Image: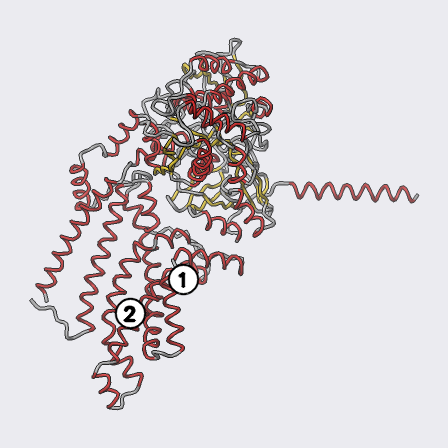
Amino acid sequence: MRSVWALAAMAALSVLTASTATLAGEPKQGGILRMYHRDSPANASILEGATYSINIPFMGVFNNLLIYDQHIAQNSPDTLRPDLAESWSWSSDNKKLTFKLRQGVKWHDGKPFTSADVKCTFDLLMGKSQQKLRQNPRKAWYNEVNEVTTSGELEVSFDLKRPQPSLLAMLASGYTPIYPCHVSPADMRTHPIGTGPFKFVEFKANESIKLTRNPDYWKKGLPHLDGVEYTIITNRSTAILAFVAGKFDMTFPTHITIPLLKDIKSQAPNAVCVVEPTNVSTNIIVNSTSAPFDNIDIRRAMSLALDRKAFVDILFEGQADIGGTMLPPPQGIWGMPKDKLETIPGYGRDVKANREEAKKLMQKAGYGPDKHLAVKVSTRNLAEYRDPAVILIDQLKSIYIDGELDVVETANWFPKVARKDYMLGLNLTGSSVDDPDQSFYENYSCGSERNYTNYCNREIEKLVDVQSQETDVSKRKPLVWDIDKKLQEDVARPIIFHARAGTCWQPYVKGVTIMSNSSYNGFRYEDVWLDK
Amino acid sequence: MFAYLVRRLFLMLVTLFGISVVIFFLLRIVPGNIVDILFAAAGYVDPADKAELEKQLGIDQPLAVQYLHWIGGLLRGDFGYSYVSEKPALQEILPRIPITARLAGLALLFSASIGIPLGVISAVKQGTRLDYVLRVVSLSGLSLPSFWLGLLILTASVAMFGQMPIFNPNPKTWLEAFATYAVPAAAVGFRSAALTMRITRSSMLEVLRQDYIRTARAKGASDAAVNYHHALKNAILPVITVIGIEAAFLIGGLIVTETVFNIPGVARFLVEAIRWRDYPIVQNLVMFIAVVVVFANFTVDMLYAVFDPRIRYTD
């Protein structure tokens, strides 16, 4: 009899525990998520932007055709989820991608969403429409798209020049929201209309951005929040102090440097903080069109002189990643495995031996202890550029290169780089999707606008095209690794490290996932809630 | 007096014209424009898109044409559009002026209400311990940068009270509203108060040594009457000058305080506008500040006559 009572008591306890757990984990409706924003974005149009300062506040206003799962940190082909498209399919030759669209979706102004809106969006992006975007930084993403066609109101197809499985990755990026046909690009800059969980309320430059719940959101029961408010605070110290004081529920995503994270944890020990890669690489751009870096020996010597671990230890207290062009694993999908990476000259662990080899190359080029090579190391006047540039100059000293820091105002940086008015430059390159097509075509393809160094290798170009058409991920990966290895060996744009950064939120903020291989795709916030 | 007023007003117009030329051309000397910055953020430069955008914004026109376009617009009350927000410049500037004006006004009030009495006390008690303490306080006020003091106040508030007095656009209580402006005003006004105190002290010391002060004392006037009625009234002129200069300085000089306390006033807005090379905003805002400075100087000159009957502006 005692055992029966014991069993009954255990059963009652387990039911109670289970129900309590359900209550604790069940999302609560309401509340405004308060965050600070690190700067005042130029406008509210994601399609025209090239900074996550626009993505983060405005991604929740929109939907994409498909989206990366917002609760899985690593974006991968396996985490693509339907959004405005209910499903998609490839033709047998992989040259036509067809989307079946969701029915009953409405824009925030009440007009119905149809396939025409999808066509308008991509015609705008491909430069085929009457209306023009003021800036179109991702036009090249759709180079392989012939045209976008509609079939009825709920079906849309992308006709491709050749198979490009990566197109799905780009369509799922936070940078690819669907815009309404009936709102001009100019209006989208100042008052965006979307189909997303939050409606735009106001954007006061240098002050605040406010979004409110979309009560007619097509995902029933979402969003949980009544709104999201961003207060623009450009001074990082003030912003972090305000978070510590409880003025904000969350910091601006990936805005906290590793040293600052310690401060937050000591001042707000209950704060939940995560550190993830940002998929932004710090790299060296070399002007190989003029002396002395037209000499491959000097370029190789410079690459051999890099002590990447020292950069990571000094700037990130050891918490950053060393890799090639693609973000290294485990967070990166396409990065080279460690054993392959270490076979690349300059990536070996013996820095002293690397530098001895570098010195020999420098001596071969006519430089040595008595004849140093004087170079200017140009970089943008921002801390994340300046600090590694200073370390770079220090490291180059070990191989007879005397560097002088040339700090360039942001407004003049890209014009200067485009004019090839530099010898060596320290640059940051962000990847909005962890995908080889985006990275290789954008940064290394002959004639690409963002191929600052004008690196052009026809052999590599062919290999990039081959990997781009490969639909089997397991077969594509080795191709990507070989290309990446070759790019590093060619000193096309030596990668120093891949940065990591922190994000913190108050313990009552639930449902936030910081993406681990992109800083651009995880800010829909439709199922974030406040456990208050 | 009337002729003097007319002459001063004419000189003010000439000054403002000169300032407009200087603002306009200095801004164009700074390398890069809004289009460069927009493309810098995008990480590429497309020459065709860049040219198109420059044409849309009118910055492809010759400088003289751009200048005339701006001045012509100003005279017609057309302040142009912000290149960044694409809203009318006036709509962007106007709501920010009261915020900065309140902050500057409170800082000046703080400066005058603290600086003048302490300056008088320091002068009257010259050579005493109190005088030394006040002089050290005033020196520290002049030496501590307001951004450092601001950050110190914020850090101390968070550490001691778990609260932070940053700008709140919709204060719920009177205390919140007061904290919104009072703390930053104190941070910026501390330096100003120190300056006012030092000027008051030195001016008072000079006046207190005058014969008529000795005469007043000999006639049996009380200390308060001598110090405040006779001495301060005559010592106040240089203090008014300094407060006038400070008033003008504060409008443009609140940049750091507005940034640290995250106050959306004109000063921080101006810095952002310069960063974006948002010419319509920068030109109009700097002209506004110039107008304030010129008028402040004019007002100070007029106040001289009120406070010192010996000064009369004659033809």
Residue furthest to the top: A93
Mark 2 or mark 1: whose residue is earlier in sequence: 1
**Residue A402, horizontal then vertical, whole percent:** 40, 34
- Element at badge 2? helix
Residue topped by disc 1: B182
- Left or right: A95 as drawn, with respect to A191: right
Q: Label 1 sits on what residue type?
A: Ala
Whether A26 is drawn above or below A114: the answer is below
Q: Pick the residue in front: B308 or A126.
A: B308
Residue kind at label 2, given as amino acid type:
Ile
Q: Is residue A31 above or below residue A139?
A: below
Q: Quadrant of the N terminus of chain A?
A: top right
Position of residue B179 measured from the top left corner of the image (x, y, whole percent) = 43, 60
Quadrant in the picture for residue A54: top left
The residue lying toward the viewer, choosing from A391 and A384, is A391
Q: Is residue B83 above or below residue B233?
A: above
For residue B155, the mark is: none
Q: Which residue is mark 2?
A: B199
Q: Where is residue A60 shown, x and y percent of the image?
A: 48, 35
Residue reaching furthest to the left: B315
Label 2 Cα crowd, 10 Å radius (few <14 / some 14-19 / many 20+)? many
The nearer-to-camera label among 2 and 1 is 2
What chain letter is assigned to the residue under label 2? Answer: B
Q: Is residue A103 among what the camera can see? A: no
| Element carrying mark 1 | helix
The residue shown at (41%, 22%) is: A122
